[in-house]
Image (tube, rainbow, N blue to C red):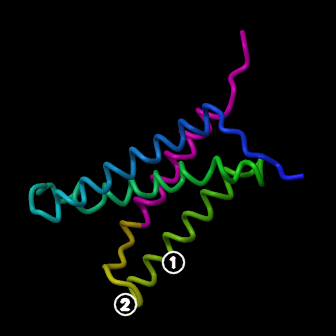
Amino acid sequence: MKKEIKLDKRLILCELLSFISLSFGILIYALSYKKILYIPLIRSFFPDFLWMLSFMLAITPLLMEVFSKHAILISALLCLLLSVLFEIFQFLDILGGTGDILDIAVYFAADILSCIIIKFIYVRRKSK
């Protein structure tokens, strides 16, 4: 018998926040590509931050079905590992782009924020 994934409010909220983060990251990237957005810090790092946040918010609730207790830690480490590998491949010219240690710091900050958001959404507060 197959186990069904329940679509509860918390999962829907995480996926909605993921979609919003991804959309804003794409919008900022598009505006900077068209030379409409000139603020270097936002243009260079904020889309990466939003994309990592989106990725974490999307996969962590799904991993909770498999790894229930440690899903947040596993998804945070997985996302950070993938982002570090991505930057190394860019640095080695295996992938396009510029490998940058600041990008890894941005991914790490997004990882931390997403863990806080997911904990806030999923951890129920004890009643008074």
Q: Which residues are magenta?
A: 104-128
Give percent across and percent down for residue 3.
82, 49
Q: Is residue 32 left or right of residue 86?
A: left
* Residue at position x 40%, y 59% in the image: 106
Name the quadrant of the C terminus: top right
The residue indicated by pointer 1 is 85
Amino acid bearing label 1? Leu
Residue 88 in the magenta stretch? The answer is: no
Q: Is residue 97 left or right of residue 117?
A: left
Amino acid bearing label 2? Asp
Give percent across and percent down for residue 38.
11, 57
2, 126: nearer the viewer: 2
Q: In the displayed structure, would residue 10 be above or below residue 96?
A: above
Q: Which residue is farthest front?
A: 1
* Residue at position x 25%, y 63% in the image: 44
Give percent across and percent down for residue 108.
48, 58
What label does residue 27 carry, if any? none
Q: Which residue is farthest bottom?
A: 93
The residue indicated by pointer 2 is 93
